[in-house]
Image: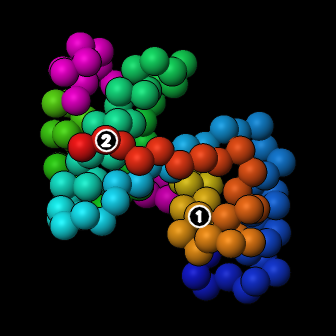
Amino acid sequence: MTKESESRRRLILDRIGTLPLDTLIYRAPKDGRSEVERRAQCIDALVTDLAAAPASLLCFERDETLVARDRRRVVEASHRIRQPIEHRHASATDEPLLAIPDALAWAWARGGPWRRRCRGTSERRPSV
């Protein structure tokens, strides 16, 4: 989204808004904890929520610096809730649907009129 023109950004978000999606953005507050700790907290909340959802696969965008830590965290969280969660990491070229959360996260972070274009999206701040 950062390289797109404003009109293209609006078009992308408007098209996403026509899809039958309910999206939830997990966001741990910047409260002195590291990004690693905040990401782990979000993954814990995501795994817990997925256990109650009809989802069958959790797919993260591949970032080699995060893959091992993410996998470990998903497995640990799955054990805590006693339900395995199938998960994988993929590149955006291998999994084109990863463009949707990227676009929504970009718009959500910008706030204002960009956030208002994120129809069907809400935010969850996992508890510590």
Q: Residue at x 81, y 57 (%)?
A: 15
Can residue 71 be found in the magenta stretch? no
Tag 1's secondary structure?
A: helix
Residue marked by disc 2: 127
Q: Position of residue 120 (x, y in %)?
A: 71, 44
Q: Residue flagged by tag 1: what amino acid is it?
A: Trp
Q: Residue flagged by tag 2: what amino acid is it?
A: Ser
User: Looking at the rendered structure, which numbered label has been put on residue 32?
Assistant: none
Is residue 64 at all visible to an observer of this figure?
no
Q: Give how far apart the Cα atoms at labels 2 and 1 are.
A: 20 Å
Q: Residue at x 28, y 53 (%)?
A: 39
Front of the two marks 2 and 1: 2
Quadrant containing the N terminus in the rendered view: bottom right
Residue marked by disc 1: 108
Q: Position of residue 94 (x, y in %)?
A: 50, 53
Q: Residue at x 75, y 51 (%)?
A: 119
- Answer few, some or many: residues within 10 Å of disc 1's Cα (few below 14, many 20 plus, some between 14 and 19): many
Quadrant containing the C terminus in the rendered view: top left
Tag 2's secondary structure?
A: loop
- Sequence-wise, the earlier of marks 2 and 1 is 1
Report whether 36 appears left or right of 116.
left
Q: Position of residue 18 (x, y in %)?
A: 83, 48
Q: From the viewer's perspective, is residue 103 above or below residue 124?
A: below
Q: From the viewer's perspective, is residue 118 above or below residue 122?
A: below
Q: From the viewer's perspective, is residue 83 above or below residue 113?
A: above
Residue stretch in magenta:
77-94
From the viewer's side, name the closer residue of 79 and 42.
Answer: 42
- Answer few, some or many: residues within 10 Å of disc 2's Cα (few below 14, many 20 plus, some between 14 and 19): few
Can residue 81 be found in the magenta stretch? yes
Picture quarter containing residue 61? bottom left
Q: Position of residue 102 (x, y in %)?
A: 54, 62
